Image (cartoon, rainbow, N blue to C red):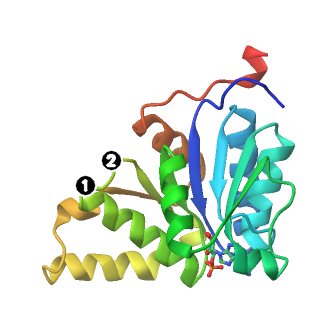
């Protein structure tokens, strides 16, 4: 692993399960590989199951840094990924989410379940309130989030949200467009480790 500090830090929210569509797991692995091979740091929930474990292991395998942040209750259930470069064990979910947000330059939600939805909506809400100014992305892999995106548009049409709130997030079905765009929006430059070693 490189001893240089990571060139960027991205927080990934994703399923603690792999889902059915094999393209979810493929995207999770490819994203981890991209983060690691560009000298980046992954901040995530510290679990070893599902897409979470896949992103983390692929980041590590490609030479990246992985910061896992997990509540004690999940460690007790033996769900922690002990391979993380750093594993922060915190007492509460609030502490966990605050630390994840603090340590990241940008946020990316992959397909996932209720935990992923909650994390994504929370950082989006924090952004609209001005608690942070970091880019937030939603990977609509294989159209997984089509129904949710339609509903969000309904919310705009019904004027419970303004179009400007939708403009605070990037939604894309292609991680190869979305991930570099988020890193660029964050104002950090991914280094190409192969060139810089
Ligand atoms: P879900 O989408 O419901 O599978 O929840 C995944 C999200 O919630 C992740 O981004 C994690 O931050 C958190 N999470 C849920 N389950 C776990 C677990 N077993 N270990 C670690 N984090 C988890």
Residue carrying label 2: 133
Toward the viewer: 106 or 179? 106
Q: Check whether the beta carbons of the residues at disc 1 and disc 2 lie within 8 A of each other.
A: yes
Instruction: Answer with left or right where residue 129 lies relative to residue 121.
Output: left
When asked about the image quadrant of residue 147, the answer is bottom left
Ligand 1 appears in which quadrant? bottom right
Residue 187: quadrant of the picture: top left
Say if 167 sits above or below 3 in the image. below
Residue drawn where x is 79% and y is 27% of the image: 2
Q: Secondary structure at mark 2?
A: loop
Q: Can residue 17 be seen in the rendering of this structure?
A: no
SS class, disc 1: loop
Determine the residue positioned at 68% across, 67% down. Answer: 70
| Residue 176: percent from left, percent from top | 59, 46
Is residue 135 among the parts visible in the rendering?
A: yes
Query: Quadrant location of the N terminus?
Result: top right
Figure disc tally: 2
Q: Residue at x 64, y 59 (%)?
A: 44
Figure quadrant of the C terminus: top right
Can you give x and y, in whole percent of width and height, for residue 192 in the image?
68, 24
User: Which label belongs to residue 130?
Assistant: 1
């Amino acid at each position: 692993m490189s001893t240089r500090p990571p060139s960027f830090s991205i927080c990934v929210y994703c399923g603690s399960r792999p889902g059915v569509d094999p393209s979810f797991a493929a995207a999770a692995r490819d994203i981890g590989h991209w983060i690691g091979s560009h000298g980046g740091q992954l901040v995530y929930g510290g679990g070893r199951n599902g897409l979470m474990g896949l992103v983390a292991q692929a980041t590590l395998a490609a030479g990246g840094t992985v910061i896992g942040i997990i509540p004690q209750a999940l460690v007790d259930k033996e769900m922690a990924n002990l391979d993380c470069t750093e594993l922060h064990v915190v007492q509460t979910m609030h502490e966990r989410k605050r630390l994840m947000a603090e340590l990241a330059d940008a946020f990316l939600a992959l397909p996932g379940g209720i935990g992923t939805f909650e994390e994504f909506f929370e950082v989006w809400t924090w952004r609209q309130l001005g608690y942070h100014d970091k880019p937030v992305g939603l990977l609509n892999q294989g159209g997984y989030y089509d129904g949710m995106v339609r509903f969000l548009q309904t919310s705009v049409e019904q004027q419970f949200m303004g179009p400007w709130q939708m403009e605070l997030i990037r939604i894309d079905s292609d991680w190869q467009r979305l991930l570099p765009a988020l890193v660029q929006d964050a104002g950090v430059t991914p280094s190409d480790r192969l060139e810089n070693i």
